Image (cartoon, rainbow, N blue to C red):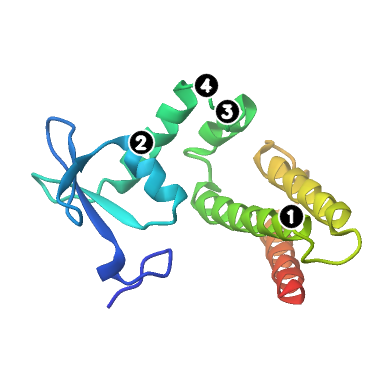
Amino acid sequence: MAKSRAGATEDDVVTIKKYANRRLYDTERSCYITLEDLGTMVRDGRDFRVVDAKSGDDITHNVLTQIIMDEETRGETLLPVNFLRHLIGMYGDKMQSMVPQYLEASMTAFRKNQQDVRSALEGALGSNPLAELTRRNMEMFQQAAGAFIPGAGGSKTKDAEIAALKAEVAELKAALANKN
């Protein structure tokens, strides 16, 4: 059995069929659903994949992007304009292939810190963990912002930049391992 990115087996992944009339069909519950329902499934941690009912092509990426667009249109903006500009600017760039892994690692670290903050608020951690988590979050955001600013690497060569990124990832892994 293959594993999905959430760690569930393929049997645990709900298949959603998207028909030409834009309707989405949940094969697990045998009913039609909306993009809002898919958003709720994401927030609930339920793994799914969306396939085109006619061709069988996996269109999960497109549908997830549409959910983000719908949320942003409703005024619940999460993505700052400058971030979007930098992201668009990365398309076609030499570093484009590294962006998805970097963003995924950054989001994973952010979610972990978010969980730590919640635990701290519930009294599960020591004396002043919020200050430390805030400092780490600020460092992470500054590093993320620096990755999208053209020329931020200065005169470093590509190999030096990659080595620096690997060192940062190793430091983050070590810090996360120490927290656990």
Find residue 38 and report its horizontal and vertical position in percent. Answer: 34, 43
* Residue depicted at x 30% and y 47%: 60
* Residue depicted at x 58% and y 32%: 79
Q: Does residue 26 sit above or below 71 in this rendering?
A: below
Name the kind of residue labelled 4 in the image. Answer: Gly
Find residue 91 and report its horizontal and vertical position in percent. Answer: 48, 38
Dot 4 falls on a residue whose secondary structure is: loop
Residue placed most toward the observer, 53 or 169: 53
Return the residue found at the far right.
127
To which residue does mark 1 refer? 117
Name the kind of residue labelled 3 in the image. Answer: Arg
Return the residue found at the far left.
54
Classify mark 2: residues with Cα within 10 Å, few (<14), some (14-19) or many (20+).
few
Find residue 172 and report its horizontal and vertical position in percent. Answer: 72, 65
Find residue 20 and report its horizontal and vertical position in percent. Answer: 12, 33
Q: Nearer the viewer, mark 2 or mark 3?
A: 2
* Residue depicted at x 42% and y 29%: 69
Q: CA distance from mark 1 to mark 3?
A: 30 Å
To which residue does mark 2 refer? 36
Residue placed most toward the observer, 15 or 127: 127
To which residue does mark 3 refer? 85
Q: CA distance from mark 2 to mark 3?
A: 26 Å
To which residue does mark 4 refer? 75
The image quadrant where one finds the N terminus is bottom left
Classify mark 1: residues with Cα within 10 Å, few (<14), some (14-19) or many (20+).
many
Name the kind of residue labelled 1 in the image. Answer: Val
Q: Nearer the viewer, mark 4 or mark 3?
A: 4
The tag earlier along the polypeptide, 2 or 4, is 2
Specify whether 4 is left or right of 58. Answer: right
Q: How many numbered marks have been drawn onto this rendered protein structure?
A: 4
Dot 3 falls on a residue whose secondary structure is: helix
